[in-house]
């Protein structure tokens, strides 16, 4: 038997064992006090980024104003004293996890939206995704005299726009984004225009809604729901929309390519009450559980989700298998990322600060635990220990995604490849490492079937971006290749 690696996964805290949900963008135009609508939209998108948030608004009299804050939207952008400083009928906002730049150590200058003043007026820009050639672009721009204010890859877009010779801001943005590789959903604004753009592959989501006489752009439909906006449609991959008082114009500034939307949006990132590609995220996740029950049945007494992201899949597994669904683990709803951890003793409690076992339910039972993913495996081990401490007879893990064996370079903060459990271990080795009676992941084809692709994955031309599972990167990660990252060998 192959020697297992010497504990490379054991020293990481609970929060470091989940993929970070990239970022969320939101914008509105044609409403009074637009910043208030933006704050609500950001609140609905809080699951996509909890580190910091920012809003830029424009008023015809007072011009552009901005506010950037660390922490939750509810703790910052609900104060009348702050919101009064952001007047006007147009605004955009951004919630962030650090994906590029100083990870986990963000400076306020890294918080979006970014703002640039051009000869034809100002422009603010908020970006969800990751620019895979940012390092090369940054070097080129600095050599030509650009002065960067942040460590974020997104700032490259502003500098590329500044160097464009086009006569208006939408045209300058087209110029800039044609130079950019990777994934981007962009919401931007000028004094009179709201702009939305998706990259040619449509890796990250962006939707359009109607709110009264105005319009809204959001990373997800749940952002439209919170402000009472009517969902109109998704922005197409490779499309730019420019919205002003006269209405909406649509442009196709990029060479047309086959869509490769991020399949992990269906598995984990998006809220279950959102609609993606015309499909309910909740229903896709429930169907993942159905597929899992077909692929990996096991005799047990209860199906329990690891809350909250494992819940829809656990419901589907229960319905398909006939094994009763139960809330065997309870989440502390008031546990936030800002919880004060004053002592080493409390820090070592880790997962117990967030999750607690329903002991009366678990004791003596054979338990199927359904979770969304296994990254480093540290959280799975701690949850298993909690379940066994509560007296469970058996613990079986069922995972609602294939093994995460490759890092994402398109806007998701994943560990380096060697720190991903599935990159160094087989499924059986992971089972032994975590210490459970069985461990099974949904197959890639099963995931595709759950997402509406009846025939599974088209290996010749995949319908989604699934690089974190397959190692099949639809856009070459130029900056990482330069650093020595090795792509999967051709089969």
Image: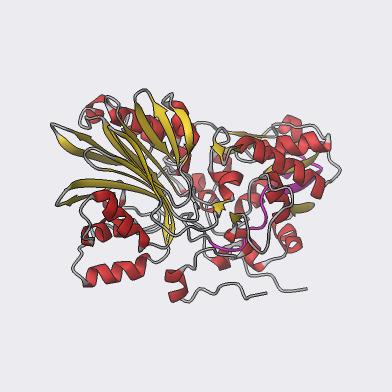
Q: Residue at x 43, y 26 (%)?
A: 229
Position in image of residue 141 (x %, y %):
25, 67
Q: Is residue 31 above or below residue 101?
A: above
State which quarter of the image contains the N terminus: bottom right
Q: Nearer the viewer, residue 205 or 164?
A: 164
Left or right: 395 as drawn, with respect to 189: right
- Residue 403: within the magenta? yes
Q: Residue at x 17, y 52 (%)?
A: 118
- Residue 42: within the magenta? no
- In magenta, the rendered stretch is 388-407
Position in image of residue 346 (x %, y %):
50, 44
State which quarter of the image contains the C terminus: bottom right
Q: Residue at x 40, y 37 (%)?
A: 217
Q: Nearer the viewer, residue 253 or 282?
A: 253
> How would you classify the magenta stretch by its main secondary structure?
loop
Q: Residue at x 73, y 31 (%)?
A: 326
Does any portion of residue 364 appear in the rendered image?
no
Left or right: 114 as drawn, with respect to 373: left
Q: Is residue 101 above or below residue 221?
A: below
Q: Quadrant of residue 268?
A: top right
């Amino acid at each position: 038997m192959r020697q297992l690696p010497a504990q490379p996964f054991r020293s990481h805290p609970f929060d470091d064992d989940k993929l970070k949900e990239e970022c969320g963008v939101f914008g509105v135009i044609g409403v009074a006090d637009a910043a208030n609508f933006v704050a609500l939209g950001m609140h609905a998108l809080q699951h996509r980024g909890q580190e910091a948030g920012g809003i830029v608004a424009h008023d015809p009299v007072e011009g552009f104003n901005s506010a950037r804050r660390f922490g939750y939207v509810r703790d910052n952008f609900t104060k009348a004293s702050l919101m009064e400083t952001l007047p006007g009928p147009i605004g955009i906002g951004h919630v962030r996890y650090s994906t590029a730049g100083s990870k986990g150590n963000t400076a306020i200058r890294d918080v979006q939206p970014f703002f640039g003043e051009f000869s034809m007026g100002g422009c603010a820009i908020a970006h969800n995704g990751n620019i895979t050639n940012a390092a090369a672009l940054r070097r080129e721009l600095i050599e030509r005299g650009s002065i960067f204010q942040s460590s974020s890859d997104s700032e490259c877009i502003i500098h590329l726009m500044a160097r464009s010779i086009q006569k208006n801001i939408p045209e300058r943005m087209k110029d800039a984004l044609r130079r950019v590789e990777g994934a981007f959903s962009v919401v931007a604004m000028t004094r009179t225009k709201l702009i939305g753009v998706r990259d040619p592959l449509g890796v990250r989501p962006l939707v359009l809604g109607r709110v009264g006489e105005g319009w809204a752009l959001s990373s997800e439909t749940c952002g439209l729901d919170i402000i009472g906006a009517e969902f109109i449609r998704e922005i197409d991959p490779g499309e730019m929309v420019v919205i002003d008082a006269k209405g909406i114009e649509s442009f196709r500034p990029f060479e047309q390519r086959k869509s490769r939307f991020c399949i992990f949006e269906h598995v984990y990132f998006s809220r279950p009450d959102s609609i993606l590609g015309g499909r309910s995220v909740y229903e896709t996740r429930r169907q993942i559980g159905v597929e899992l029950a077909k692929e990996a049945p096991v005799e047990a007494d209860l199906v329990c989700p690891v809350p909250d992201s494992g819940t829809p899949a656990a419901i589907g597994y229960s319905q398909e298998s006939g094994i009763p669904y139960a809330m065997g683990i309870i989440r502390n709803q008031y546990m936030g990322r800002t919880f004060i951890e004053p002592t080493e003793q409390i820090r070592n409690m880790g997962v117990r600060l967030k999750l607690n076992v329903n002991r009366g339910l678990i004791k003596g039972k054979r338990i199927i635990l359904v979770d969304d993913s296994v990254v480093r495996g540290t959280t799975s081990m701690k949850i298993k220990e909690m379940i066994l401490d509560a007296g469970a007879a058996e613990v079986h893990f069922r995972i609602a995604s294939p093994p995460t064996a490759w890092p994402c370079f398109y806007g998701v903060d994943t560990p380096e490849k060697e720190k991903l459990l599935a990159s160094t271990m087989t499924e059986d080795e992971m089972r032994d490492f975590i210490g459970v009676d069985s461990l099974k992941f949904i197959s890639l084809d099963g995931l595709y079937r759950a997402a509406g692709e009846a025939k599974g994955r088209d290996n010749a031309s995949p319908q989604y971006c699934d690089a974190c599972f397959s190692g099949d990167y639809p856009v070459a990660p130029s900056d990482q290749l330069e650093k020595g990252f090795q792509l999967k060998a051709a089969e």
